[in-house]
């Protein structure tokens, strides 16, 4: 791929920047603070979703509300594209230039167009771009951090995640299932009863059930027989009781008939006397009826007249009430008219106040806008001043801290130099070489003593063998010992050996005394090496810190100048003066009282609306009262006409009341004849009925006397039959049989319950046995799955490392080739990812194997570039790279070495962009862009 053009609007220090790039090496050259890194940041943010230094809203140029990043580039498909990113919203749009089509799925499309194999952001951040001060950092980082960085690039975390999370969940699930199934198995096993024992118990209880059932059947038959006898006895007893009751009832009926006959005779006599009284009072009764009818007619007439009289009196009352109401209504109309007049006067006053207040509010609102604009401007200026002051304070603190760091480093260097000089004065290397020589002599003497001891033993053995002068092999006299004293011969040899060993031991003791301080000298040597390494590191750190002091001093002066320019541009004398102006406008704004006036205006508006409503209500009330007044006056006119036409109704009512009183007096005089007539009429009419009733009662008496005689005979016969049974014994036998049946039934119910319980236990046991078999099978299956999961999980966890190792082997080959091209040297790059050295880089020669951090600065740069280039070949087809300030903090020799290294690598790329503040790469660049 190739970037053709970058256009920035209001992005950091660039208000309107347009840069075109070419093929090959493009050099962005400019001093610090010119926004070189901001251009690279924009490329990373827009194209590769790389994280910016801050949130997008803070990337806007000061005082601007929106910005834009626009990048034109050529994809590996040969087409040209434009990607546009809005600031601060962050919205992106990818378009093909040839047809203007907008492409969806930006990240996937960028991955395709830039030829990136893997995560776009990670590959860009760690392979395509080498950021300022981070060129070799990834390879020098701690093992843990290296593992995190390169696992993300190689995308091997997925295997660890599967092993440690996904498969762990599966394993835990199987372990949980296994535990649950085992618990179920144990629970069921603990409660199972032997099924054979239960079946035997079931047979025994069924036999007992049959025996009880047979006994119960025999007792039930006997109970039925006794029950039948008792039923017969009860029937006889009931029959006798019934007959006696009938006998008593018949006797009572006879007595009642005799009494009724006497009563009927008396009643017949009374009826004959009543018949005489009725004949004597018939005329008086008829006259009473005639006068009573006349009175009824008069009362009907009186009721009609009374109704008219009541209506007449009602109308008189209504007329009086209406006249009172008319007076009240007229008074109400006068009150309402007064209210309308008062409301109209108040409405005029409120309308006048409303107009004046509304005019005042409009004038104050104009002033409010003016004051708010001034307050807003002053607030922004105060805020900007505070930002400048805070930044100046921050820069000053940073500068002071950096100066302190520089002084501390300088002091530490002097202290270390003094310690190095002190140690060098001790001549440590010569002393250690002498001690090594002493150790070698000691070892030689110890070896010699070992040999001498062996010779001493051999001589002793030889003496024992040859002390008889006979050769043990030839079985004859030893010619070499003829004429010699064997004991003296071997004693002299052994003594000589002992003397030599003693001399050697003495020398060894002297050497031990000499070399006993070797560990102390080694410690001094280690301390000297450590001090020398620290001296070198602090020297580099001193140069870096000095550069930081210069940069921080420059930054402090720059921000101070910016503050002064801002004050001059905005005609600001001091922040206190701005605060005074701000407070003055705030007070004037508060004194406008727009909110209070607006509330008062709303209150007036509500009052005016309420007055209008009240006037409308008063008018409606007046109209309704007037209508009601006319209705009542019309009603009174009708009442007056009616009262005039019926004014004699009271006289008529008095006259008819007098007539009724006269007739009622006449009726009272006839009342005795009427009462005697009515009291005796019913008795005289019932005389014949009582004569017939007397004859009927005599017949019933004769019949009942005959019935009583028959009942007496039946009672005597049944009592004789009852005496044949021994009722007490039969009842006692029945109670005993019933008790025995109850006992057997209780035993039968108990045995049935026991049989059901046993049968249920047997059924449940069989089910439990089936369930145990299923659980056993299931436990075996879960165990198999669990073991497979553990095995698979262990292999998957290690798979990421194996994948990374294969990738590293491929990267090693290409990186070694790159290193040899860059340096012309024959060493090999080894990139290891074992547990002891996670992603550790080695440079291996014929007799050397150096870790990355042991390499010189130039070697580290060459190795890092070689590996990055190799990774770029594997993970991306873009043939594109970016270097941000690669020479930062390097001396001239290392800068040139880096330039030579990068130049060799960049020959194979379609495009590269180098951002720098020096001209080290100027000669190799196809295009130089000055900022």
Image (cartoon, rainbow, N blue to C red):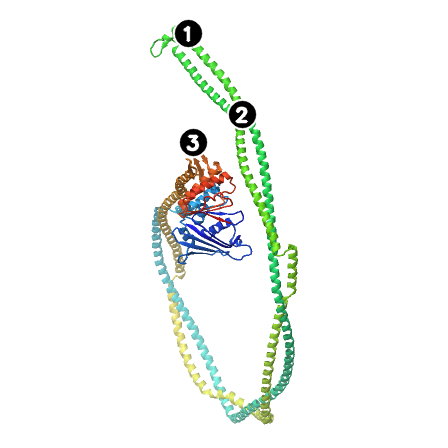
Is tag 3's residue or tag 2's residue first in the polypeptide sequence?
2
User: Given the current orientation, which residue lies at the most extreme top position?
Assistant: 483
State the CA–CA distance, disc 3 to disc 2: 31 Å
State the CA–CA distance, disc 3 to disc 1: 61 Å
Res 424 seen here: yes
Q: Can you tell which of label 3 and label 1 is closer to the viewer?
A: 3
- Position of residue 327 relative to residue 818, above or below, is below
Query: Percent x, y for residue 441?
Result: 48, 21
Q: Which residue is mark 3?
A: 847
- Most foreground residue, 210 or 879: 879
Q: Which residue is mark 2?
A: 517
Q: Quadrant of residue 425?
A: top right
Classed neighbour count for the residue bearing mark 2: other residues with Cα under 10 Å, few (<14), some (14–19), many (≥20): few
State the CA–CA distance, disc 1 to disc 2: 50 Å
Q: Which residue is mark 1?
A: 485
Is tag 3's residue or tag 1's residue first in the polypeptide sequence?
1
Query: Percent x, y for residue 853?
Result: 48, 37
Query: Percent x, y for residue 775?
Result: 37, 47
Q: Secondary structure at mark 3?
A: loop
- Most foreground residue, 370 or 562: 562
Query: Percent x, y for residue 670?
Result: 55, 92
């Amino acid at each position: 791929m190739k970037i053709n053009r970058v256009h920035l609007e209001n992005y950091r220090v660039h208000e309107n920047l347009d840069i075109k790039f070419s093929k090959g090496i493009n050099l962005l050259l400019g001093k610090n603070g010119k926004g070189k890194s901001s251009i690279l940041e924009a490329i990373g943010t827009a194209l590769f979703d790389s994280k910016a230094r801050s949130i997008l809203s803070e990337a806007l140029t000061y005082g601007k509300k929106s910005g834009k990043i626009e990048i034109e580039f050529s994809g590996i498909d040969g087409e040209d594209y434009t990607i546009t990113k809005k600031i601060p919203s962050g919205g992106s749009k990818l378009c093909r230039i040839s047809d203007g089509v907008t492409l969806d799925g930006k990240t996937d499309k960028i991955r395709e167009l830039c030829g990136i194999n893997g995560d776009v952001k990670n590959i860009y951040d760690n392979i395509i771009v080498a950021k300022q001060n981070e060129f070799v950092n990834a390879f020098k980082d701690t093992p843990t951090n290296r593992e995190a960085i390169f696992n993300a690039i190689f995308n091997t975390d997925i295997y660890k995640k599967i092993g440690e999370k996904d498969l762990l969940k599966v394993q835990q699930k199987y372990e949980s299932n296994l535990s649950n199934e085992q618990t179920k198995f144990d629970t069921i096993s603990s409660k199972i009863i032997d099924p054979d024992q239960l079946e035997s118990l079931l047979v025994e209880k069924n036999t007992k059930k049959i025996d009880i059932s047979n006994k119960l059947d025999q007792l039930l038959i006997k109970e039925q027989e006794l029950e039948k006898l008792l039923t017969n006895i009860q029937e006889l007893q009931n029959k006798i009781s019934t007959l006696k009751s009938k006998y008593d009832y018949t006797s009572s009926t006879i007595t009642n008939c005799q009494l009724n006959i006497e009563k009927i005779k008396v009643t017949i006599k009374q009826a004959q006397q009543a018949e005489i009284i009725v004949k004597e009072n018939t005329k008086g009764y008829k006259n009473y009826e005639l006068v009573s009818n006349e009175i009824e007619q008069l009362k009907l007439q009186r009721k009609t007249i009374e109704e008219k009289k009541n209506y007449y009196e009602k109308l008189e009352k209504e007329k009086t009430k209406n006249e009172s109401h008319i007076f009240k209504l007229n008074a109400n109309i006068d009150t309402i008219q007064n209210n309308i007049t008062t409301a109209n006067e108040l409405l005029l006053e409120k309308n006048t106040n409303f107009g004046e207040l509304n005019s005042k509010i409009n004038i104050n609102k104009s002033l409010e806008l003016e004051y708010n604009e001034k307050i807003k401007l002053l607030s922004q200026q105060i805020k900007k001043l505070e930002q400048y002051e805070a930044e100046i304070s921050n820069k000053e603190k940073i500068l002071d801290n950096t100066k302190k760091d520089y002084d501390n480093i300088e002091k530490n260097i002097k202290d270390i130099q003094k310690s190095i000089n002190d140690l060098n004065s001790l001549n440590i290397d010569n002393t250690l070489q002498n001690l090594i020589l002493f150790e070698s002599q000691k070892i030689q003497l110890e070896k010699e003593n070992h040999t001498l001891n062996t010779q001493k033993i051999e001589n002793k053995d030889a003496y024992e063998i040859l002390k008889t002068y006979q050769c043990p092999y030839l079985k004859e006299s030893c010619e070499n010992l003829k004429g010699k004293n064997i004991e003296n011969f071997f004693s002299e040899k052994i003594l000589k050996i002992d003397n030599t060993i003693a001399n050697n031991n003495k020398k060894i003791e002297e050497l031990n005394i000499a070399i006993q301080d070797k560990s102390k000298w080694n410690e001094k040597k280690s301390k000297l090496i450590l001090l020398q390494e620290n001296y070198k590191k602090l020297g580099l750190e001193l140069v870096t810190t000095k550069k930081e002091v210069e940069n921080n001093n420059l930054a402090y002066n720059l921000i101070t100048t910016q503050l002064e320019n801002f004050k001059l541009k905005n005609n600001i004398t001091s922040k206190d003066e701005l605060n005074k102006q701000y407070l003055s406008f705030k007070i004037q704004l508060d004194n406008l009282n727009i909110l209070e006036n607006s509330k008062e205006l709303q209150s007036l508006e509500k009052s005016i609306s309420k007055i209008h409503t009240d006037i409308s209500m008063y008018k409606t009330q007046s109209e309704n009262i007037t209508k009601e007044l006319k209705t009542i006056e019309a009603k009174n006119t009708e009442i007056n006409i009616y009262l005039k036409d019926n004014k004699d109704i009271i006289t008529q009512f008095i006259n008819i009341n007098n007539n009724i009183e006269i007739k009622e007096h006449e009726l009272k005089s006839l009342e005795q004849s009427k009462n005697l007539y009515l009291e005796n009429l019913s008795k005289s009419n019932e005389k014949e009925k009582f004569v017939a009733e007397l004859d009927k009662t005599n017949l019933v008496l004769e019949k009942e006397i005959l019935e009583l005689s028959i009942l007496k005979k039946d009672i005597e016969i049944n009592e004789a039959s009852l005496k044949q049974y021994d009722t007490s014994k039969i009842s006692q036998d029945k109670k005993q049989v019933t008790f025995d049946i109850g006992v057997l039934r209780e035993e039968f119910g108990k045995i049935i319950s026991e049989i059901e319980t046993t049968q249920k236990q047997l059924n449940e046991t069989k089910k439990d046995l089936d369930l145990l078999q299923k659980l056993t099978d299931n436990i075996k299956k879960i165990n198999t799955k669990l073991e497979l999961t553990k095995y698979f999980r262990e292999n998957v966890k290690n798979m990421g490392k194996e994948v990374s190792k294969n990738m590293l082997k491929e990267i090693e080959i290409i990186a070694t080739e790159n290193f040899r091209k860059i340096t012309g040297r024959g060493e090999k790059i080894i990139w290891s990812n074992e547990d002891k050295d996670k992603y550790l880089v080695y440079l291996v020669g014929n007799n050397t194997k150096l870790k990355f951090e042991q390499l010189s600065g130039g070697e580290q740069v060459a190795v890092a570039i070689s590996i990055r280039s190799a990774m770029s070949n594997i993970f991306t087809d873009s043939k594109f790279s970016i270097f941000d300030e690669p020479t930062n903090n390097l001396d001239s020799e290392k800068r040139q070495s880096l330039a030579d290294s990068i130049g060799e690598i960049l020959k194979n790329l379609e495009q590269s962009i180098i951002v720098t503040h020096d001209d080290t790469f100027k000669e190799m660049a196809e295009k130089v862009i000055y900022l």
